[in-house]
Amino acid sequence: MPGVIYGLGGGSLSFKVESRRLRTVLVEGHALFDVEFDGGKALPVIVKDQQRHPVKGHVVHLDLLKVDLAEKIQTTVMLELEGGEEAPGIKEGGVLEHVTREINVEALPTDVPDRLVADVSGMGIADTMTLSSVTPPPGVEILDDLEETVIATVTAPTKVEEPEPEVEEEAELVGEGEEGEEGAEGAEEGGEEGSSEGSEEG
């Protein structure tokens, strides 16, 4: 897997790493990790960008940024929801929508959390949760607008109107009535023919 490390005194450094080892690090979700080149000094880095395959979705190129552990950085952190199954609105059939999945934060590299979690267990139907409901850990500042950034909503279930069965039954009754009328007309014609034949014979 090819990649580039930026932040090396204004320069950059290209590298290659075994895809399996890279996936292990990315899946663990650590915001900060170390990179070593041929057993040399470890460089503390964060993920700056991931380029993914347009169809398969796996990472094809990785951009890393070297950081100073004593200086604050601005980066993005994944935002996850928990407690959805316990939410009253979900139990009533509402639909939970996860609106914002990443938020911008500022902190020392060692304080950047792997993820932030929002508790939606108290949401009812038609409720909206904003970023103000999320409490970051000490030393972490959320940069996005706390009141304007919507992170989750619960919407009422969509009602599907089924066709009224009375219309079909009515159509069937009308059809049966027409057949009955035809049968009655046939009986009347047969009766008339029978009576005329009887009179002629008499």
Image (cartoon, grey):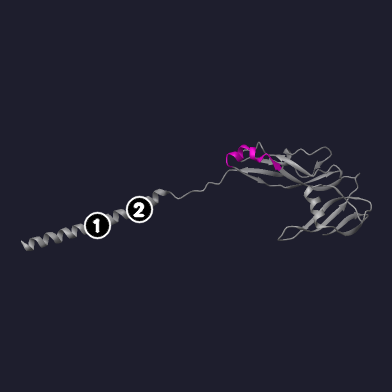
Q: Residue at x 25, y 58 (%)?
A: 182
Report the span colored magenta: 81-93
> Between residues 100 and 55, which one lies in front from this camera angle?
55
Q: Are marks 2 and 1 in contact (CB under 8 Å)?
A: no
> Which quadrant of the rendered structure holds the C terminus?
bottom left
Pointer 1: residues within 10 angstroms few (<14), some, or many (20+)? Answer: few
Place of residue 200 in the rendered image (x, y in percent of width and height, measured from the top left): 7, 63
Q: Is residue 185 above or below residue 102?
A: below
Q: Residue at x 64, y 38 (%)?
A: 87
Place of residue 46 in the rendered image (x, y in percent of width and height, measured from the top left): 84, 50
What number is the disc on residue 70?
Answer: none
Q: Which SS class for mark 2?
A: helix
Pointer 2: residues within 10 angstroms few (<14), some, or many (20+)? Answer: few
The answer to if 84 sits in the magenta stretch is: yes
Q: Which residue is mark 1?
A: 183
> Which quadrant of the rendered structure holds the N terminus?
bottom right
Q: On the rendered structure, is 163 left or right of 157?
A: left
Q: Which residue is mark 2?
A: 172
2 or 1: tag closer to the N-terminus = 2
Q: On the rendered structure, is 69 left or right of 162?
A: right
